[in-house]
Amino acid sequence: MTEDTEIVLERPAIVTIRRVIEADIPELLEMIGLLAAHHGDGLEANEDDLRRDLFGPMPWVTALVAAAGDGLIGYALLTPLYRAQQGKRGMDLHHLFVRDGHRSHGVGQHLMDRARDFARKAGCEYISVSAATGNVKAHRFYEQMAFIPRPVTGMRYLQALD
């Protein structure tokens, strides 16, 4: 996934979905902190952690960002998975976040579409995501995006990629 995707949302805004760049790290970290706070967690990561894991000699995660105007309004964070017994590659959508004021306008769906594209290009056959048991809004969103619920601890979803 090298090309950026521009989308025009219901609101009069142009949003670009693209891979994160180093200059995005402060805003990305801020959004990670907002998501952590939403779940009652503290933010322990720092900019150096993100720089290492996104751009270091062995990148560990992939981040896609939604950029609009002068800043970032959302992100998707992906980590590789593997089912050794099946020999299948997968991708975990570790985080999907859209800032307040930009939700319910399609940003999350477009981030999800790009995450699927990225996973397919990486040779993945599935993508999974978890949502807290009580996060009904997230459950509905993922089910509307054709994920299949797979209860584990909390709720785990799986989607086959063709």
Image (spheres, rainbow, N blue to C red):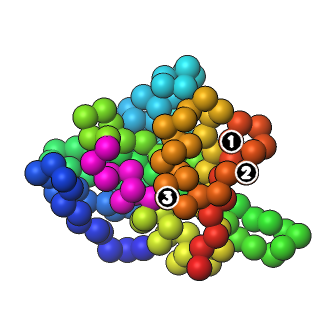
Whichever of labels 1 and 2 marks the residue nearer the N terminus, that label is 2
Residue flagged by tag 2: what amino acid is it?
A: Arg
From this view, report whether residue 135 is shown above or below residue 19: above
Q: Are marks 1 and 2 in contact (CB under 8 Å)?
A: yes
Location of the N terminus (image quadrant): bottom left
Residue 79: image location, x then y, percent: 61, 56
Give the residue at x 32% y 60%: 17
Residue depicted at x 51% and y 41%: 138
**Span of residues in magenta:** 104-112
Give the amino acid at mark 3.
Met
Circle on res. 155: 1
Question: x, y (%) of residue 83?
Answer: 80, 66
Q: Is residue 157 left or right of residue 135?
A: right
Going by the numbered disc 1, the residue's amino acid type is Met
- In this figure, which residue is indicated by the disc labeled 3? 145
The residue carrying pointer 2 sits among few (fewer than 14), some (14 to 19) or many (20 or more) residues within 10 Å by Cα, namely some
* Residue beneath the point at 49% across and 55% down: 144
How far apart marks 1 and 3 lie (CA) works out to 15 Å
Taking the magenta stretch, the answer to whether it contains residue 110 is yes
Residue 16 vs residue 124: left or right?
Answer: left
- Tell me the SS state at disc 3: loop
Q: Which mark is residue 107?
A: none
Total numbered circles: 3
Residue 96 located within the stretch drawn in magenta: no
Q: Position of residue 30 (x, y in %)?
A: 38, 32
Disc assigned to residue 150: 2
